[in-house]
Every structure is written in structure tokens, then in C-alpha cells.
Image (spheres, rainbow, N blue to C red):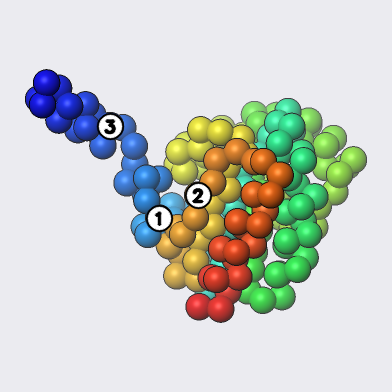
Amino acid sequence: MRNRIAALAAILTLAVPAWAAAAGVQAPAFTLQSVDGRTVSLAQFKGDVVMINFWASWCGPCRQEMPLLDSIYKQYKDMGFVLLGVNVEPDSHSANAWLKKTPVSYPILYDPKSQVSQLYQVQAMPTTVIVDRQGIVRFVHNGYLPGDENQYMNSIRTLIVQ
């Protein structure tokens, strides 16, 4: 029995990337195209607190969360905070249609081949990752329920003053 438990623990350790299981590792680098055609990379925001929000237009919680994220972005953007919305859909038409109805002021990036979402081991929509000024992952949150934005703001406020 003890051997089975040890074997299962070893398998689970290999199946979950270390950075996803615990904060404290370097955020994986990426470069994506933005909604306005610019090339945006995580590296250009070194020195800022960065929230990466993975979303899809078909995701109800994503749609519910986006206006709240926009409020957070507007509140903290002048304090060294950046919010990057990463759309994970293979075709950006639905995302663009959604953004026309519900525009946001933060940058929206496209990950049509899900390369960045795979790099970040995204398994739920939405997934939110907060990275500190040194590029270290400090917070990972899967899904969205009303009130989760308070956790985001607590993390952002803590990291902005560091």
C-alpha cells in the first residue's frame, strides 16, 4: 500500500509543472499579436506588476469578469500595473464581436494556437496569473466567481508597493 501511494505521488509530481503548483518561479516568456496588430511580449513589462488573464468569448464567467478587470486596470495602471487579456480561441472573430459590445481599455492579445495557454498550463476559463516586478509568478487563479476580483486587488496592491 505504501508503495502505491509513493508511486501515485511521484506520478502527480511529474504531471503538474512546479510553477503551476506553487508561486515563486519565473513567468514563462511569450510574444503575441495584439488586437491592434502590435507585437507584445511579457518581457517589455519587466519592472511592472503584470496580470495575465486567459479568456474566451464563449466563457460566461470571462464575460462577467472582463468589465471588473477593466475597472481594476484603470485604477492601478498608473502605479506600474499592466493587465494583458489573452484570448485563447483559434478564430478571433467571436472575440472581436464580444469586444465591440463590451470594450475594455487593457491590451487584448491573441493566442490562436494556444501556445501561451499551454505554456502556462491553463486548464480553466478564465485563468488569471499575477507576476511581480521581477517576473516571478505570485498568484494563479482558475475560474471566476463574483468576489474573486477582491483577491486580485489584494495581490496587486501588495505587489505594487514592493
Residue depicted at 85% across the width and 35% down the height: 97
The residues tagged by marks 2 and 1 sit, at their Cα atoms, a distance apart of: 8 Å
Question: Alpha carbon of mark 3 to alpha carbon of mark 1: how far?
Answer: 17 Å
Give the amino acid type for the residue marked by disc 2 in the picture.
Answer: Val
Q: For residue 48, say whether it is visible.
A: no
Q: Residue at x 83, y 37 (%)?
A: 98
Estimate the spatial distance between the alpha carbons at disc 2 and disc 3, rounded to whole Å: 19 Å
Q: Is residue 28 left or right of residue 110?
A: left
The amino acid pointed to by label 3 is Leu
Which of the two labelled residues, at mark 2 and mark 1, occupies the earlier sequence position? 1
Query: In the rendering, at what x and y percent does residue 85 appear?
Result: 67, 49
User: According to the image, label 3 marks what residue?
Assistant: 12
First in residue order: circle 3 vs circle 1:
3
* Quadrant of image for the N terminus: top left
Which quadrant would residue 38 be assigned to in this image? bottom right
Callout 1 crowding tier (Cα within 10 Å): few <14, some 14–19, many ≥20: some
